[in-house]
Amino acid sequence: MNREDTRRIKSAMALAGITNASIARRIGCKIEQVSAVLNGRRATPYIRRAIAQACRSQYVLLWGESDPGIDRHPPGGRSVHTVTECSPDRAGEVVGSGR
């Protein structure tokens, strides 16, 4: 992502009355994470998706690539894993980050 892309996306947000803070509140992340996505330092799909939805734009039109449809870390920062490689009595158990 280059500076022109960043300006275009920020302009779309401004036209829609959207701020970094409003996106962060909407999806439960930090403003700094939204800023990092907008400045091309990160390509976090759920943040990109929230920005596209708030701007009432399609993901591909705003970001120039199709939505991968997956998130490595879900909104809210909670990682959930399924235990598969441990004792047989715990196989399939869902464990979280404990927050």
Image: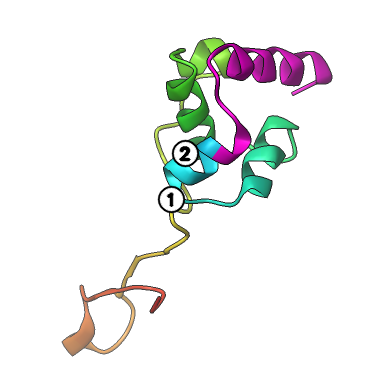
Disc 2: which residue: 46
Colour setup of the view = rainbow
**Is residue 64 in view from this perspective?**
no
Expressed as whole percent of the image width and height from the top left, the position of residue 91 reads: 22, 79
Kindly state the secondary structure of the residue where label 1 is placed: loop
Report the number of numbered marks: 2
State the CA–CA distance, disc 1 to disc 2: 7 Å
Point out the residue furthest to the left here. Answer: 89
Specify the segment rendered in magenta: 1-21
- Compared with residue 44, is residue 38 higher up or lower down, i.e. above or below? above
User: Residue at horizontal 60%, vertical 30%?
Assistant: 19
- Compared with residue 36, is residue 50 higher up or lower down, i.e. above or below? above
Q: Amino acid at mark 2?
A: Tyr
- Compared with residue 76, is residue 34 higher up or lower down, i.e. above or below? above
Tell me which numbered mark, 1 or 2, is placed earlier along the sequence.
2
Expressed as whole percent of the image width and height from the top left, the position of residue 18 reads: 55, 25
User: Residue at horizontal 47%, vertical 54%?
Assistant: 73
Kindly state the secondary structure of the residue where label 2 is placed: helix
Q: Circles 1 and 2: CB distance less than 8 Å? A: yes
In terms of image quadrants, where is residue 81? bottom left
User: Residue at horizontal 65%, vertical 17%?
Assistant: 9
Expressed as whole percent of the image width and height from the top left, the position of residue 12 reads: 60, 13
User: Residue at horizontal 75%, vertical 39%?
Assistant: 41
Disc 1: which residue: 75
Expressed as whole percent of the image width and height from the top left, the position of residue 75 reads: 43, 50
Q: Amino acid at mark 1?
A: Pro
Crowd tier of the residue under label 2, counting other residues whose Cα lies within 10 Å: few below 14, some 14–19, many 20 or above: some
In terms of image quadrants, where is residue 90? bottom left
